Image (cartoon, rainbow, N blue to C red):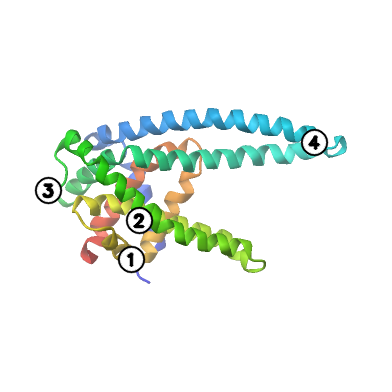
Amino acid sequence: MSGNLFTGAGYFLRGLTMLSEPGLRRFVIVPLMANIMLFSLMGWLLFEMISDFYDAALLTVPEWLQFLSWIITPLLWLVGGLMTGYISTFLVLMLTSPFHALLSEKVEEAVTGEPVPALDGVAAALLEVPRAFFREIRKVLYYLPMALGVLLITAIPVINAVAPLAWFLLGAWMMSLQFVDYPMDNHRLPFRDVRDACAARRLSTTGFGGAVAFFTGIPLLNLVVIPAAVIGATLLWCEELRQHR
């Protein structure tokens, strides 16, 4: 395997530092606002669901076990926060993909100094929504068989000890494919080429995807994960993957 895990993770961190650059700021704002609205809505719905579940669950717990609520409560809210972060991130990716493509285009032009023959403004990008939607569906279809395989491992005693690592590695791989797809799709490269390019620099792409997956699960910080990941993936494409297309 080629590449470097730490260099890969560094692309995401570099993406975070570039969020406020003047030439990129306007392409960051729309996905950020969409993420805030979705996260707030889902957070409210989750609060209502967990509150009802928690109250009902406590009624079934014997009084002498009530002390467990001190352990269960923070764990319940932690899991809820992580779920909210992951689901809202997925929905924002589906709804605001044209802006991600534009952001990736501007980053690549700034890094390479070469024009990207991609999208000419927001109006043209919006016309790409149907095609982008079906491309996102293809990623989901690619992910499902692997997820089912890891789920099977999770259900097998002894072997399931490696399940958490398997889930994390799968998440890292899919995050790298998800975001590297934006700069490569700007060049009208098929999803097969995205997989091949990421596989050619697997350590770098795993480090990048792992960093994205980790920060996606952190409440509030995950609000800026998507634009930072788009920028980071474009840097990864420009510096390591273009030669493998």
Q: Secondary structure at mark 4?
A: helix
Q: Residue at x 21, y 65 (%)?
A: 243
User: Tag 2: residue type?
Assistant: Leu
120 relative to 159 in the view: left or right? left
Taking the spot 37% from the left edge, 60% from the top edge, the residue there is: 205
**Which is more toward the observer, 63 or 16?**
63
Q: Secondary structure at mark 2?
A: helix
Question: How many other residues sit within 10 Å of disc 3, few (<14), some (14-19) or many (≥20)?
Answer: few
Residue hosting label 3: 115
Disc nearest the viewer among 3 and 4: 4
- Give the mark nearer the N terminus: 2 vs 4: 4
The C terminus appears in which quarter of the rendering?
Answer: bottom left
Question: Pointer 4: what residue?
Answer: 60
Badge 2 or badge 1: first in the primary sequence = 2
Q: Earlier in the sequence, mark 4 or mark 1?
A: 4
Q: CA distance from mark 4 to mark 1?
A: 52 Å
Query: Cα distance, mark 3 to mark 2?
Result: 23 Å
Above or below, 85 against 184 in this view is above
Of callouts 3 and 1, the N-terminal one: 3
Report the amino acid beneath label 1: Arg
As displayed, is residue 114 above or below residue 158?
above
Task: Nearest to the eye among marks 2 and 4: give it.
Answer: 4
Residue 213, visible in the rendered structure: yes
Residue under label 1: 201
Question: Residue 223 sits in which quadrant?
Answer: top left
Amino acid carrying mark 3 in the image: Pro
The residue beneath circle 2 is 177
Mark toward the start of the polypeptide (3 vs 2) = 3
Q: Picture coordinates of residue 59 (x, y %)? A: 79, 32
Amino acid at the residue labelled 4:
Thr
